[in-house]
Amino acid sequence: MVLHKQVKLITVVIMAITMIVCALLVMDRLDGNIQVMQGKVKNAELELRQVQQKQGEITTEIANMDKESYIIARARELDYLMPGEMRFVVVNPEVLTDDPAGVKVEEWQNP
């Protein structure tokens, strides 16, 4: 009877140790998964902030589109001229500092 109790006790102890080892392995794996997920969350939050910033810039640009000053500035960026304006392009800028009389000026045609 004592031997039978010892076998049961050894079996229970072995099973308990096995369960503890399995639980530790599972917890270690879960910890690794949690860290990976936290990294993904941080990346997603960074991407969200970037998208929100871009959205703010676009919203501001849309709000400015009705302003004449914005329209003129954008037209200038695209190389447009106002009616009656003439564009001059310096084709030999090296003479600007040496001999201003040697400047060759050509009229530029807007495409």
Image (spheres, grey):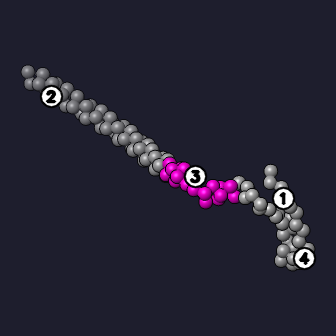
Q: Residue at x 65, y 59 (%)?
A: 73
Dot 2 falls on a residue whose secondary structure is helix
Direction from residue 82 to residue 106 in the image, left or right? right
Specify few, some or many for label 4: CA neighbours under 10 Å numbering under 14, 14-19, or 20 or more: few
Question: Alpha-carbon distance for marks 1 and 4?
Answer: 20 Å
> Which residue in the protein does label 3 denote?
65
Give residue 9's mark.
2
- Give me the C-alpha separation between circle 2 and circle 3: 82 Å
Amino acid type shown at disc 1: Trp
Q: Nearer the viewer, residue 68 or 26?
A: 68
The residues tagged by marks 3 and 4 sit, at their Cα atoms, a distance apart of: 43 Å
Q: Evaluate if marks 1 and 4 touch, with contact meaning CB atoms under 8 Å apart.
A: no
Of marks 2 and 4, which one's residue comes earlier in the chain? 2
Q: Nearer the viewer, mark 2 or mark 4?
A: 4
Q: Which residue is most to the bottom?
A: 98
- Residue at image position (88%, 71%) is 103
Q: In the image, which residues are magenta?
A: 53-76
> Mark 4 — residue?
101
- Residue 19 visible here: yes
Quadrant assignment for the N terminus: top left
Hey, what amino acid is under mark 3? Met
